[in-house]
Amino acid sequence: MFLMKLQSLVPEQEISDAKEDYKSAKRVGQYKVSAKAIYKPDGGYVPFAAVKDYVIDKSSVHVTGCCAGGVPVERIILITDEGKFPFIFDSQKAVDKVVELMKLCI
């Protein structure tokens, strides 16, 4: 049974069939990515139709007891009229996969 509540992080942009879209999504890192949106583990999603631009950069995340406190990661920041939404990935290959899916919709 599908218990997760899916909620658009961009209030005026929702996917009408979000549950079906989520079921068709593929896992990329900790996120699920479909042809219409990227879904966070908590059920929040950013519809690609709301994305005006994006930025790819490198960052680091804090990990206690490892690598002097920081591990390098790849990051994609989706820019919408409502704000910026960062998504963190382990590899550039994962970021490229998300960008490829997103370009089909933008």
Image (cartoon, rainbow, N blue to C red):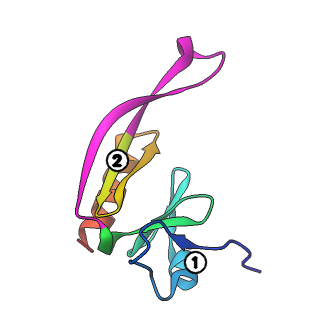
- Please give the residue where the numbered disc 1 appears in the rendered image: 23
Look at the image and tell me in which quarter the C terminus lies: bottom left
Q: Position of residue 97 (x, y in %)?
A: 35, 57
Q: Position of residue 64 (x, y in %)?
A: 65, 20
Q: Position of residue 57 (x, y in %)?
A: 29, 37
Is residue 13 left or right of 64 when viewed as pictured? left
Q: Is residue 16 above or below residue 54?
A: below
Q: In terms of image quadrants, where is residue 47?
A: bottom left
Looking at numbered disc 1 in the image, what kind of residue is underneath it? Lys
- Looking at the rendered image, the disc whose residue lies closer to the viewer, 1 or 2, is 2
Is residue 92 left or right of 64 when viewed as pictured? left
| Structural distance between the alpha carbons of marks 1 and 2 | 23 Å
Disc 1, SS: helix
User: Is residue 56 inside the magenta stretch?
Assistant: yes
Q: What residue is rendered at 61% in x and 58% in y?
A: 41
Q: Main secondary structure of the magenta part?
A: strand
Residues 92 and 20: in front is: 20
User: Is residue 11 inside the magenta stretch?
Assistant: no
**Nearest to N terminus: mark 1 or mark 2:** 1
Look at the image and tell me in which quarter the N terminus lies: bottom right
Q: Residues within 10 Å of mark 1 (few under 14, many from 20)?
A: few
Q: Residue furthest bottom?
A: 16
Q: Position of residue 99 (x, y in %)?
A: 29, 58
- Which stretch did the figure color magenta? 51-74
- Please give the residue where the numbered disc 2 appears in the rendered image: 76
Q: Residues within 10 Å of mark 2 (few under 14, many from 20)?
A: many
Q: Residue furthest top?
A: 68
Q: Is residue 85 above or below residue 102?
A: above
